[in-house]
């Protein structure tokens, strides 16, 4: 099984550029979410979705947009990249609220 | 607001020793607690999931316990091996301002097993 697949693995952006981080899962999971990981701060929730067509904000949503048009895909859009968005981004999915969460391999983003 | 703490931040032990990693959380109203392993530059690999109604879970040399009332979990690793070297993350799933889909992570314990 492919599990949770994130693309790209690495990306360098210039300040002000926009881009989309892709996340796809093939496990038919309803719940999907995006986290960012920064040194000394743990992973923090950006946005999440409880099913196709339903999204909501997490702890640190500013500067990011999401949409969920299908069960499988949950892209994260950076509207105008800033150096503060330099981080490692992880996508996660789980079948239900109280089940195991599965993570992708991450996207390492640098904004210069 | 849920907060998760993992102490120590780093730990080095000789190969073959048994060891315990600690995780504490401030709000006992959790759905479950999950332990992950993260290798440098890699993603998170799920190790064990403990539901709020359970006391412990075992997988191979790993045993995780949960004491919800005191807000604590431990990950016990038996007969440690150099391949166990990694950062171990604890995460609790709980409700709150962001709805139900929220994992709150600790900052991890970086474990080094010395051959």
Image: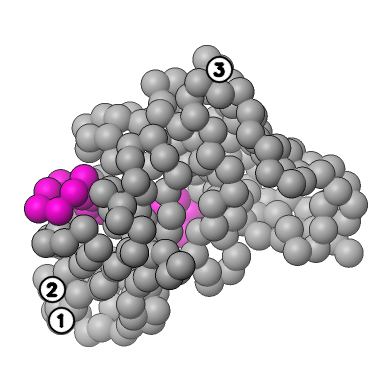
Residue B37, x across and y down, in percent: 59, 55
State the residue position of label 1: A17
Q: Nearer the viewer, mark 2 or mark 3?
A: 3
Quadrant where the C terminus of chain A is found in the figure: bottom left
CA gap, disc 2 and disc 3: 44 Å
Q: Quadrant of residue B81?
A: bottom right
The foreground one among B17 and B5 is B17
| Image disc number at residue A80 | 2
Asked if the residues shown at circle 3 and circle 1 are in contact, with their CB atoms under 8 angstroms apart, the answer is no
CA gap, disc 3 and disc 1: 47 Å
What stretch of residues is rendered in magenta? A35-57
- Badge 3 marks a residue whose secondary structure is loop
Residue B30 is a magenta residue: no
Height in image: A94 above or below A25? above
Q: Is residue A22 left or right of residue B31?
A: left
Q: Quadrant of residue A90?
A: bottom left
């Amino acid at each position: 099984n492919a599990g949770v697949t994130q693309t790209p693995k690495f990306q360098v952006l210039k300040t002000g550029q926009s881009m989309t981080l892709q996340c796809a899962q093939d496990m038919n999971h309803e719940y999907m979410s995006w986290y960012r990981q920064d040194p000394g701060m743990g992973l923090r929730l950006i946005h999440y979705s409880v099913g196709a067509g339903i999204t909501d904000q997490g702890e640190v949503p500013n500067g990011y947009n999401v949409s969920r048009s299908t069960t499988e895909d949950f892209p994260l859009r950076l509207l105008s990249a800033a150096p503060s968005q330099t981080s490692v981004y992880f996508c996660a999915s789980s079948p239900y609220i109280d089940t195991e969460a599965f993570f992708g391999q991450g996207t390492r983003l640098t904004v210069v | 607001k849920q907060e998760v703490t993992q102490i120590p931040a780093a730990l080095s032990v000789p190969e073959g020793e048994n060891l315990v990693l600690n995780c504490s959380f401030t709000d006992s109203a959790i759905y479950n607690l999950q332990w992950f392993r993260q290798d440098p530059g890699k993603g998170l690999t799920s190790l064990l999931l403990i539901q709020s109604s359970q006391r412990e879970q075992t997988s191979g040399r790993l045993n995780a316990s949960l004491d919800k009332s005191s807000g604590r979990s431990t990950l016990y690793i038996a007969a440690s091996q150099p391949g166990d070297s990694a950062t171990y993350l604890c995460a609790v799933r709980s409700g709150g301002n962001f709805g139900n889909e929220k994992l709150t992570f600790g900052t991890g314990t970086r474990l080094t097993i010395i051959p």
